[in-house]
Each structure stands twice: as C-alpha cells, then as structure tokens.
Amino acid sequence: MFIARWSIEARFGHKAEVLDQMHHWLREIGSQIGWTEANTRLLTGSIGAKESTIQSEIAVASLAELETAWAKLASLDSHAAWSKQLEPHVVSGTQHWEIFRLLG
C-alpha cells in the first residue's frame, strides 16, 4: 500500500478558493479515475506547517495502480481545464508529488 501526496501552496488570500477547487476536483474529476472520499483526504497546514500548504493524500494499492490513474488523468480534458482555473490561485512551481510506502 502506498500514499501518494500532492502538495501545492495557495497564494495569499486564495486558500478558500483553492480548497473549493480541490473539493470540486475530487467530486467531478478524481472520481473518474477512482479517487474518491473513501481513499483520498485533503489536508492544510496548521501548526509547524505553512498555512498556505494544501495537500491531497491518495491511498493506492500499488505503484502500478498510481501509474494507471495518472495515465487516465492525463487524458481528461476536464482535468486540463480545471488546472487552468486553479493556476491563478496557487504559487507557481510549488506543486509536487511525494510517494510514501505504508507500513504495518
């Protein structure tokens, strides 16, 4: 089992909009690739982390499952359109993925 974590930084004053966009993405786009509220959670910085940080954590059974989801995601026009809507609300260049192996 793996946790795929996508991180992004909201621009000052734009955090609420980014969170709204992330919730929309999960309902409308993520669900098309099998990422739902059952296997995904959204986090935001609180104590000891930047308050502008927003993370999406997705539980996947294998790296192959993650690669398949990413390939499907790349083919969705709705994802490309969503990315363009999100762009003005985030700090450019801050988005990145981290993959963690879940133990136990």
Image: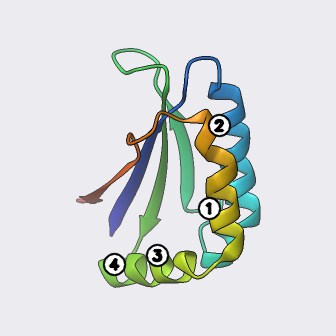
Q: Which mark is residue 62?
A: 4
The numbered disc on residue 70 is 3
Which is nearer the N-term, disc 3 or disc 4? 4
Q: Residue at coordinates 34% horizontally, 84% vertically from top-left? A: 64
The location of residue 16, given as percent across then percent down, is 70, 27
Give the alpha-carbon distance from disc 1 to disc 4, as whole Å: 17 Å
Mark 3 neighbour density, 10 Å: few (under 14) some (14–19) many (20 or more): few
Residue linked to disc 2: 18
- Is 30 or 101 nearer to us in this picture? 30
Q: Dot 4: few (<14), some (14–19), or many (≥20) neighbours within 10 Å?
A: few
Q: Is residue 7 left or right of residue 86?
A: left
User: Label 1: which residue?
Assistant: 38
Instruction: Give the amino acid type for the residue marked by disc 2 in the picture.
Output: Val
Q: In the rendered structure, which disc, 1 or 4, sits on the residue that comes first in sequence?
A: 1
Nearest to viewer (mark 3 / mark 4): 3
Work out how far the residue at label 1 is from the one at label 3, CA to CA, in angstroms.
18 Å
Tell me which colouring the rendered structure shows. rainbow
